[in-house]
Image (cartoon, coloured by chain):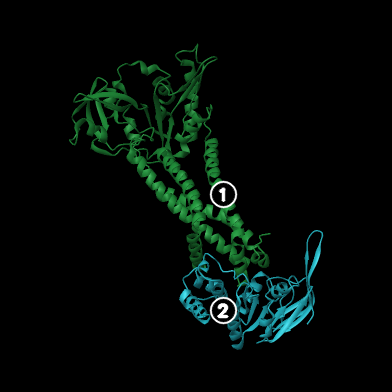
Chain colours: A green, B cyan
Amino acid sequence: MLGNYLKMALKVLARRKFFTFISLFGISLTLLVLLVATAMLDQIFAPQAPESRGDRTLGIYTASLRGEDSVYNGFAGYGLLDRAVRGLPQELPGVENISLFTTARAAISYVGGQKIESSLKRTDGAYWQILDFSFLEGGPFTAEDDAAARFVAVINETTRGRFFGDEPAVGRTIEVDGQRFRVVGVVRDVPILRVVAYSEIWVPVSTAKSRAYLKEYQGNFMALLLAHSRADFPQIKAAVDRRLDLAEAHIPDRRMFQTIDAGADTLFEAVSRTLFEARESRPELLWALLLGLAVLFMILPSINLVNLNLSRILDRASEIGVRKAFGASSHTLVGQFVVENVVLTLLGGALGLGLAAAVLAGLNESGVIPYADLRLNFRVFFEGLALALFFGLFSGVYPAWKMSRLHPVQALRGRTV
Amino acid sequence: MIQLERVTKKYRTERVETTALDNVNLTIDQGEFVSIMGPSGCGKSTLLHLIGLLDAPSGGSIALDGKPVERYGDRALARVRNERLGFVFQQFHLVADLSVVDNVEIPLLYRKTTGKERRRAALAALDRVGLASRTHHFPGQLSGGQQQRVAIARAIVGKPAVLLADEPTGNLDSQMGDEIMGILQELNQEGTTIVMVTHDPRLAERTHRVVRLFDGRQVQ
């Protein structure tokens, strides 16, 4: 019977080209947007190399300093983060490692008279232990390199190409923002969407031109805390909160700012904290927002499909009457119409997946998002498939039930009520 | 084979009650060719729909093969319609999205048959009505007479015991009408019981018995 339903569905869809086109367009476009958005969120939040330990990593990504008349919302300074995390691995057994590093900032180099703009990040040695970079040459710099302020650098594959063409880079020197660094390692390119790992050049924090950053509360630093497991998160968060409370007494400009809003968050929590400008992270709000948007995005084309299907009742009343006259029960007709819709939505789903794959490939190639590596992974694929089935059932069941309830005599007369 | 006892059919709206059939008693034996005649609106089609189990009477009882059908549920009625009855409509009611052969296969879709068996039976039915060469055409590509022949092929493909035809020649010219009537007579000679609604006394003359209705009442 299912085979018949499928065959019939394909025939009906092939003959009703306009209806099929409109339906497929709606479904595939919706899935395309959802899949591209999911792939981007995946790239930002999912634990993937070099952030493969992301599921047991907390970070202090931003900080707010507040005073009676002043507010600072932005990245924290080294001085603040140092107070928040220094010595935590010794204090809390749940903390495996900590790292302080800057955000990626533009840095200028000249190669053969040509200006090159690169992203440069200053990190400590622990950064390379927490993150899981794939080295093409050499290796990372160490805590000793940072302590000794050695002018060493790790660069990415693209930067190696810019400076040295196809030749190996380890042992050679690059000049960035007027400082000369010896290359000790070359890593694979990291997508810009991976906030923690992304850069093109990484050098020790201690090679900064000034030591003023050591005491600053406002700056361009982040902190990473690698826990032994997620179960340690509550304890770590509480410890960081306590330390941040104590750090308030040492705010460099106490006349402007008196309180600090920051905390150890997962990346998702940090985004929610920033998005809602909340003192506490609000991941449940961000989840609700994302799910709400996704549901809204799915419901609109579903309602459209339900409407289209209901309007088809009039069109297909005679067919329903004929099928009933020749032995179709209401139950059988529901099955037939639901299968028709599921086939339609699966086709739309497949089309949406294909389009999404093409758009993601286009985005990766275009360079609009530097080093983007957006992929339709299996999880996203199955989410897409589940969405398509949800569409098919959601938009098919009610019209199918309505169609099946038509009185055969009324249906044969072309009436739908 | 088919027995109707004191059958009435009333249609109710919020304010008006219309009696379409009033106290109809009718017995149709196996192998009969019965025509139902009467002026427009006298209840001919309503009677055919009741015999075809497409509608339920407001009063009285209907029995098919000696079994009363009042208590049959949706599935049981569907099965009886599928296995025992075949319909030919004035408007043909072919599914425009399906080819001729797919239209003819429709009754068999609701039986346990393989695709090959369905196709073989559908082609045989089309051959029976002289349309073997049009199997892959769509209804819109056929003349009225050809469409009605497809409709007859669809009605007989499942070898029903009873064929119910609602003005099968009503939309055809007289020559086409004669052809369709010829096919129906052949089917009847082969053993199929036929109940036909018609306005045309010439066609009614060619059947075994005429049932006349007037204002919902049986007058002959």
As measured in the structure, the alpha-carbon distance from the residue carrying label 2 to the one carrying label 1 is 39 Å
Provide residue A316's location: percent of width, then percent of height: 59, 62
For mark 1, what is the residue? A304
The disc numbered 1 marks a residue on which chain? A
Quarter of the C terminus of chain B within the rendering:
bottom right
Label 1 SS? helix
Residue A228 appears anywhere in the view? no
Q: Which kind of residue does numbered mark 2 sit on?
A: Gly
Residue B130 appears anywhere in the view? yes
Q: Which kind of residue does numbered mark 1 sit on?
A: Asn
For mark 2, what is the residue? B158
Residue shown at 75% from the left, 79% from the top = B212
Q: In this rendering, is residue A152 above or below A373?
A: above
Residue shown at 20% from the left, 23% from the top = A113
Provide residue A130's location: percent of width, then percent of height: 35, 35
Residue shown at 56% from the left, 69% from the top = B94
In the image, A97: left or right of B149? left
Viewer-closest of B131 and A388:
B131
In the image, A28: left or right of A370? right
Label 2 SS? loop
